Amino acid sequence: MNKILVTGGAGFIGSAVIRQFINDTECSVVNVDKLTYAGNLQSLASVSDNPRYRFEKVDICDAAEVARVFGEHQPDAIMHLAAESHVDRSISGPADFIQTNIVGTYTLLEAARNYWSALDADRKAAFRFHHISTDEVYGSLGENGFFTEETAYEPNSPYSASKASSDHLVRAWHHTYGLPVVTTNCSNNYGPYHFPEKLIPLVILNAVNGKPLPIYGKGDNIRDWLYVDDHARALRLVLERGTLGEAYNIGGWNEKTNLEVVQSICAILDELRPQGAPHSKLITYVADRPGHDKRYAIDASKIARDLGWKPQENFESGLRKTVEWYLHNTDWVRGVTSGDYQHWINKQYRVL
Ligand code: NAD
């Protein structure tokens, strides 16, 4: 595969995927991104001058523009990451999630199908549509068990329901039209360039600035955490070697309660940025998210067994790298936390 079309490449995971393609391979990349509040071209500053990188500011819901991009760039594969991705925003305003995650995926599938069906036999056989999704489509776990690729879908939030819908559309385009697809469902990612509406970057930046560290409910919700570069490596592997029509779960075997995550960040900051009181004094319990799923945990043994993938980063080293990145990249942080962000974040949490 020489040319990959990445949707949502200005976002957190998409930008990590593009940096890897440009830095670690000879592939060319076309980044198709609408640049919503979550899209940030600064995250691609290290590769944007490379002649193998191109950017198209396009909404994936715009069928004519998406068709133009396929025609002009003639990609060998698509990695579809563009999405509205924040559960809290999906609760207060689901419309954008329905539009981008469902209608946008449908629009992209149709454009891909038209383009793919007109390719010559060799390129047609090699073409791949890789849909990137979440473990949240499976709903919530009790104390035991893991999500496998066979777990029934039970999405509980507008975000996860919209992602589940998109997974089903991708599956249907394979079974009905033969479009060569692979789907991946991943657990919570963390790492550099993460927009600070999500738990880990929000807590790092609030702690550095002496602001309250909001924790939903009792802080006992459990998530499985994966370093973003490990996810990007897994995605590239599935794109290259995944079996068509199949799904792969990707996770870090790394379950933590939200409270444990926040306490770990505080301990790292106590060491790197000591101040009078421990940073954990800033922990503030806030009203829980409606319908908050209790526990997610991924069984990632299929991708390990079939494709030989395993995460390289453990949570302690990955979290330390992440905290250090936020401390050192103040220009990037300033860029994303100015303007509307402050207004939005101040309205988010109700202290208990
Ligand atoms: P993100 O919110 O950081 O980035 C999303 C990107 O999509 C942004 O650059 C945004 O501008 C772009 N976008 C949004 N709507 C668009 C539209 N209509 N047209 C074109 N571009 C549009 O998201 P992320 O955290 O990087 O997640 C990427 C993908 O991975 C998503 O599909 C998400 O569901 C999935 N995922 C994320 C996680 C996680 O922990 N972050 C875990 C599993 C799966």
Image: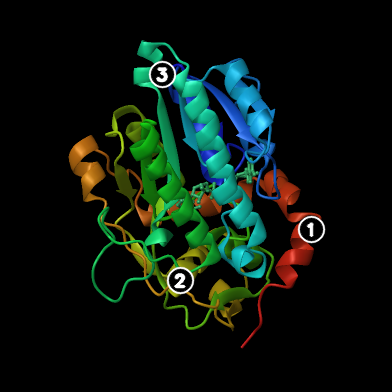
Quarter the N terminus occupies: top left
Q: CA distance from mark 1 to mark 3?
A: 40 Å
Q: Residue at x 79, y 58 (%)?
A: 340
Front in this rendered view, residue 322 or 253: 253
Mark nearer the N terminus (1 vs 2): 2
Q: Residue at x 54, y 24 (%)?
A: 29
Instruction: Return the mark for residue 62.
Output: none
Front in this rendered view, residue 109 or 333: 109
Is 39 left or right of 279, judged from the image as shown?
A: right
Is 310 left or right of 106, judged from the image as shown?
A: left
Total marks placed:
3
Residue lying farthest right? 339
The amino acid type found where label 3 is placed reads Met
The amino acid type found where label 2 is placed reads Asn
Q: CA distance from mark 2 to mark 3?
A: 39 Å
The answer to whether one can see residue 163 in this image is yes
The answer to whether one can see residue 23 in this image is no
Front in this rendered view, residue 322 or 101: 101
Q: Position of residue 269 (x, y in %)?
A: 54, 63
Query: Nearer the observer, disc 1 or disc 2?
Result: 1
Instruction: Return the mark for residue 1.
Output: 3
> Does the CB distance between marks 1 and 2 fall below 8 Å?
no
Q: Position of residue 337 (x, y in %)?
A: 73, 55
The local crowd at label 2, few if under 14, some if 14 to 19, many if 20 or more residues have their Cα within 10 Å, is many
Residue 130, image quadrant: top left
Instruction: Return the mark for residue 258.
Output: 2
Q: Position of residue 4 (x, y in %)?
A: 49, 24
- Residue under numbered circle 1: 340
The amino acid type found where label 1 is placed reads Asp
Query: Nearer the observer, disc 2 or disc 3?
Result: 3
Residue lying farthest bottom? 352
